[in-house]
Amino acid sequence: ARAHAKVRDAMLSALSEPQLSDGYLCVASSMLTGRTLASTMQGVAMPVATARAIIIQAAMALDRLHEANLVHGDIGLHSIWWDGDQT
């Protein structure tokens, strides 16, 4: 979380410092707007131009993480948030 906090990108949620709470190590993330791509699409294809723009933005955000030697554990429609206006 400390390394992630140094990465600034509009497409990434901010993370808090790790803290112990009731014996559990916790990290909080900033509130995200919009919905996941999975809930947005609900099995319906989106326009190619929109899909391309979302993929490019997600790839750029992941690149920022990789530049900081960080990885994202699970990439998929459920972990990419979109507010419908970010294309």
Image (cartoon, rainbow, N blue to C red):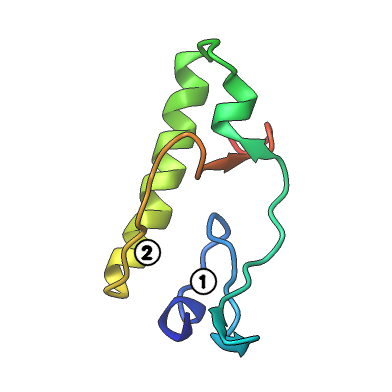
Percent coordinates x, y for residue 21 in the rendering: 64, 86
Residue at x-position 53% and y-position 15%: 46
Number of other residues with Cα within 10 Å of mark 2, as a class: few under 14, some 14 to 19, many 20 or more = some
Q: Mark 1 points at which residue?
A: 8
* Kind of residue sitting beneath label 1: Arg
What is the number of callouts on the image? 2
Percent coordinates x, y for residue 5 in the rendering: 51, 80
Residue at x-position 59% and y-position 89%: 20
Of residue 27 and residue 1, the one placed in the foreground of this image is: 27
Sequence-earlier tag: 2 or 1? 1
Quarter that holds the C terminus? top right
Q: In which quarter of the image is residue 63?
A: bottom left
Percent coordinates x, y for residue 29 in the rendering: 62, 67
Q: Mark 2 points at which residue?
A: 64
Of residue 38 and residue 54, the one placed in the foreground of this image is: 38
* Kind of residue sitting beneath label 2: Arg
Residue at x-position 65% and y-position 86%: 22
- Mark 2 lies on a secondary structure that is helix
**Residue 52 has which mark?**
none
Residue 13 sits above or below residue 69 on the image: above
Of residue 31 and residue 61, the one placed in the foreground of this image is: 31
Residue at x-position 36% and y-position 66%: 65
- Mark 1 lies on a secondary structure that is loop
Tell me if label 2 and label 1 are in contact, CB under 8 Å: yes
Residue sticking out furthest to the top? 44
